Image: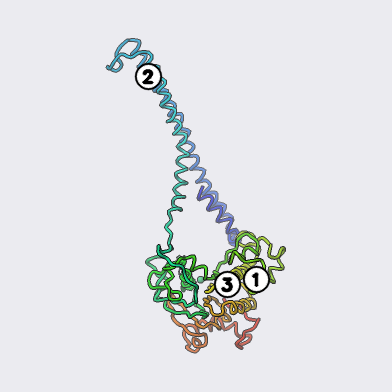
């Protein structure tokens, strides 16, 4: 049943991919296969239980027959039973009763057996889940993270997802309070892995991540994450109203504060055009909105949260360049004196960063300001030439232009 449900859930959730690649037949075939396997297992279980019942019943009658014949003959002939002692008719009757009493529970267990088996199988899955080890746990003596100022330090950090394959191989940098740090590099270089370590979604294998000089492993996760705002690559919205989705950033916020936050990140224009404005109920995972609109809501959420450290992981990749610039202006206001980490593919975002880090295969191969890295004519320069230059061509001046194309 588990495989049938999992397969079904996957093909329904991925229905667009199935259609786009014309894989309906395969999906149906696969469903038929798992379904047939489920049916076969059920048939086997049913045959087993149905066969067991008559067998047990037959055995019961054989036992009855033996008692009647052996006991009956012994009484009739007045001979000791099996060479022990002479028995009365009453004893034979008593034994007939005992046999029935003895048989009844055995037959019942046989009937229950199938149920017990499926309960054990289900229990195995549930206990497997319950027994999953928690990877990140507060230390027993974890302290509460004091009000974060914003100095983030990576001290020779090695990290990864499998113990024998470090993704980050010795990452070392300091982001001073109030700085904006941009991380660039090819896909799979480890950009997301770096930012996952700041709110301690994962632990380092070696080295230390410190915020304001405090090792993030020594404080409670709650007090740490409360002060860090994150917008991830794939945003997640709940099937609730737009208002409540933004309020998720700070549950106590009033409607006015939610609307103000949406205004700050330029999300209010599209929200007001929704059928029921802020009260519009979104579908599962935010369906009914474009990818860019979902990102705007997720960004409004962190704007409402007003964090000490902000992390944007390709958070503006699906909004147009003009909106992106509005969002950045807004964050410049919100984040005055706070620290931000931005992973982005657009030059307009990176150019203003205090520190640009070029990551490759889990190592920082270049760092500096946009300008100093260009002058260096190294890897960043090459990336810039191949990826970013198109953005600047329409208007090479520093303030960029609305005709910027999306470089991806
Ligand atoms: N949850 C995970 N489990 C195992 N490996 C992962 C996981 N997430 C990322 N990786 C691996 O870590 C490397 C870096 O990934 P990531 O930091 O997401 O790259 P980027 O964000 O720069 O594109 C990739 O090679 C990827 O395969
Ligand atoms: Mg990433």
What's the CA distance linking mark 1 and mark 3? 13 Å
Q: List the residue tagged with mark 1.
A: 262
Total tally of numbered discs in the picture: 3
Nearer to the camera, 270 or 378: 270
Contact between labelled residues 2 and 1, with CB atoms less than 8 Å apart:
no
Crowd around label 2: few <14 · some 14–19 · many ≥20 (10 Å): some
Nearer to the camera, 406 or 286: 286
Local secondary structure at mark 3: loop
**Quadrant in which the C terminus is drawn:** bottom right
Q: List the residue tagged with mark 2.
A: 67
Q: Residue 300: give x, y in percent of width and height.
A: 61, 70
Crowd around label 1: few <14 · some 14–19 · many ≥20 (10 Å): many
Task: Specify whether 57 is left or right of 78.
Answer: right
Res 105 quadrant in image: top left
In the rendered image, the vertical position of residue 120 relative to residue 144, given as above or below: above
Q: List the residue tagged with mark 3.
A: 306
Q: Earlier in the sequence, mark 3 or mark 2?
A: 2
């Amino acid at each position: 049943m588990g495989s049938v449900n999992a397969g079904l859930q996957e093909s329904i959730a991925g229905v667009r991919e199935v259609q786009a690649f014309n894989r309906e037949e395969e999906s149906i075939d696969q469903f038929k296969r798992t379904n047939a396997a489920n049916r076969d297992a059920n048939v086997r279980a049913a045959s087993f239980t149905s066969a067991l019942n008559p067998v047990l019943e037959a055995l019961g009658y054989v036992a009855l027959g033996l008692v009647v014949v052996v006991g009956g003959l012994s009484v009739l002939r007045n001979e000791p039973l099996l060479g022990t002692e002479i028995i009365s008719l009453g004893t034979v009757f008593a034994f007939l009763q005992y046999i029935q009493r003895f048989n009844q529970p055995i037959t019942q267990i046989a009937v229950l057996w199938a149920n017990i088996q499926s309960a054990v199988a289900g229990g195995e899955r549930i206990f497997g889940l319950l027994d999953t080890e928690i990877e990140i746990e507060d230390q027993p003596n974890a302290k509460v993270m004091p009000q974060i100022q914003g100095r983030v330090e990576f001290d020779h950090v090695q990290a990864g997802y499998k113990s024998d394959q470090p993704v980050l191989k010795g990452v070392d940098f300091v982001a001073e309070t109030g700085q904006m740090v941009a991380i660039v590099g090819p896909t799979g270089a480890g950009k997301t892995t770096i930012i996952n370590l700041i709110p301690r979604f994962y632990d380092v294998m070696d080295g230390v991540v410190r915020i304001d000089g405090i090792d993030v492993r020594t404080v409670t996760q709650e007090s740490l994450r409360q002060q860090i705002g994150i917008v991830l690559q794939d945003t997640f919205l709940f099937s609730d109203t737009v208002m409540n989705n933004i309020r998720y950033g700070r549950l106590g916020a009033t409607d006015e504060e939610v609307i103000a936050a949406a205004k700050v990140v330029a999300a209010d224009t599209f929200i007001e055009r929704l059928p029921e404005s802020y009260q519009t109920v979104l579908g599962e995972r935010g369906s009914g909105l474009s990818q860019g609109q979902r990102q705007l809501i997720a960004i409004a959420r962190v704007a409402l949260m007003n964090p000490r450290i902000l992390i944007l992981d390709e958070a503006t990749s699906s909004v147009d360049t003009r909106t992106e610039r509005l969002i950045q202006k807004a964050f410049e206001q919100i984040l005055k004196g706070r620290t931000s980490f931005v992973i982005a593919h657009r030059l307009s975002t990176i150019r203003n960063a205090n520190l640009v880090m070029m990551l490759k295969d889990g190592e920082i191969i270049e760092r500096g300001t946009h300008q100093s890295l260009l002058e260096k004519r190294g890897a960043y320069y090459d990336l810039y030439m191949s990826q970013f230059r198109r953005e600047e061509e329409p208007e090479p001046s520093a303030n960029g232009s609305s005709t910027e194309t999306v470089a991806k």
